């Protein structure tokens, strides 16, 4: 195996050319299938279309919305505790004296 310090290998190319593809016919078939009309889709394509329709209806942001309030409360409490420590206690003064600095 050859050892090279600062050069990485280039990724291999992937070359795929479909035998025949008509995007207009494909879109027409999908619209027909969505409306429930007789379409020439295979069972696999019909299943893919049903799965993608189900995935589009799901809301991936629900997880983030669930913890938004909790994170806001935690962040706010950290800010308030920091303000209290800085302005209403002598912790900062003691810390500065411990390092030998003068105010």
Image (cartoon, rainbow, N blue to C red):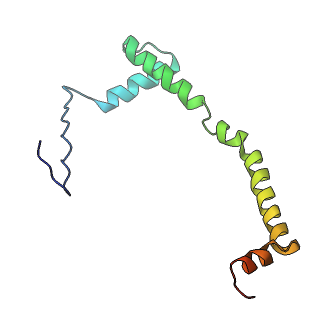
Q: Nearer the viewer, residue 62 or 46?
A: 62
Q: Quadrant of residue 16?
A: top left
Q: Whole-percent x and y of residue 46?
A: 43, 16
Q: Whole-percent x and y of residue 95?
A: 74, 74
Q: Residue at x 27, y 29 (%)?
A: 22
| In the image: residue 82, left or right of residue 89 | left
Q: Up-down: is 38 above or below 85?
A: above
Q: Whole-percent x and y of residue 63?
A: 66, 37
Q: Whole-percent x and y of residue 82?
A: 78, 65
Q: Quadrant of residue 44?
A: top left
| In the image: residue 54, left or right of residue 64 | left
Q: Nearer the viewer, residue 74 or 50?
A: 74
| In the image: residue 43, left or right of residue 12 | right
Residue furthest bottom as drawn: 102
| In the image: residue 26, left or right of residue 12 | right
Q: Residue at x 81, y 56 (%)?
A: 77
Q: Up-down: is 35 above or below 60?
A: above
Q: Residue at x 74, y 56 (%)?
A: 75
Q: Up-down: is 11 above or below 91?
A: above
Residue furthest left as drawn: 2
Residue furthest right as drawn: 88
Please state, as top left, top right, bottom left or bottom right, where the C terminus lies in the image.
bottom right
Q: How many marks?
A: 0
Please state, as top left, top right, bottom left or bottom right, where the N terminus lies in the image.
top left
Q: Nearer the viewer, residue 53 or 65?
A: 65
Q: Up-down: is 72 above or below 39?
A: below
Q: Residue at x 66, y 42 (%)?
A: 64
């Amino acid at each position: 195996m050859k050892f090279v310090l600062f050069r990485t290998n280039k990724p291999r190319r992937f070359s795929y050319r479909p035998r025949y593809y008509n995007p207009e016919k494909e879109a027409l078939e999908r619209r027909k299938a969505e409306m429930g009309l007789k379409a020439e889709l295979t069972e696999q394509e019909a299943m893919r279309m049903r799965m993608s329709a189900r995935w589009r209806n799901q809301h991936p942001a629900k997880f983030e919305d669930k913890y938004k309030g909790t994170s806001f409360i935690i962040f706010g409490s950290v800010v308030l505790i920091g303000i209290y420590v800085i302005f209403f206690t002598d912790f900062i003064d003691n810390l500065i004296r411990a390092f030998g600095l003068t105010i």
